Image (cartoon, rainbow, N blue to C red):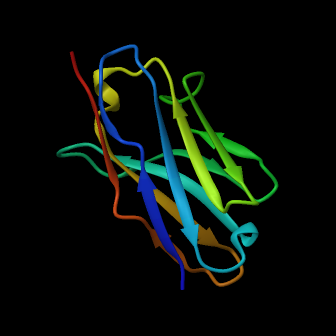
Amino acid sequence: QVELAESGGGLVQPGGSLRLSCAFLGNIFSTYVMAWYRQAPGKQRELVAQIGSGGSTNYADSAKGRFTISRDHLRNMVYLQMNSLIPEDTAVYYCNAFSFISQNTYWGQGTQVTVSS
């Protein structure tokens, strides 16, 4: 069983930065592909960024050049550094873990990010 706990959301002005954190509670963190998704009001949940166990990354076009995903295998943590935030980034951000071995996927409860002046 895996539990994910996000933190770091909040209210930020346009152009500002936030760093989201996700704590992975469970076994064999290194076998999971970790990702951040977001869901804005009235919209479908969408992938923001993804990182494999070896550190390979994938970003949504909207995140490229502004967001950076990283993972810490010693602390079992995943981070999303968000810079140059715009109002369109306002959403609930969810941490996701997926295992190719077990085909299990897990979600955190989400953290609200609001970009507004």
Please give the name of the residue rendered at 34% of the width and 63% of the height, measured from the top-left corner: 109
On the image, the x and y values in percent for residue 89 come to 35, 31
Q: Is residue 101 left or right of residue 63?
A: right
Residue at the limit of the structure toward the left, as seen here: 42
Q: Which of the 4 image quarters holds residue 86? A: top left
On the image, the x and y values in percent for residue 103 come to 61, 80
Q: Which of the 4 image quarters holds residue 11? A: top left
Please give the name of the residue rendered at 35% of the width and 52% of the height, measured from the top-left corner: 45
Residue at the limit of the structure toward the front, as seen here: 75
Please give the name of the residue rendered at 40% of the width and 13% of the height, measured from the top-left corner: 15
Vertical side of 68 occupied by 85: above or below: above
Q: Is residue 117 left or right of residue 66?
A: left
Q: Which of the 4 image quarters holds residue 14? A: top left
Q: Quadrant of the C terminus?
A: top left
Q: How many marks?
A: 0
On the image, the x and y values in percent for residue 51 come to 67, 51
Which of 38/30 is in front? 30
Q: Quadrant of the N terminus?
A: bottom right
On the image, the x and y values in percent for residue 106 come to 48, 72
Please give the name of the residue rendered at 43% of the width and 67% of the height, measured from the top-left corner: 107
Which of 79/92 is in front? 79
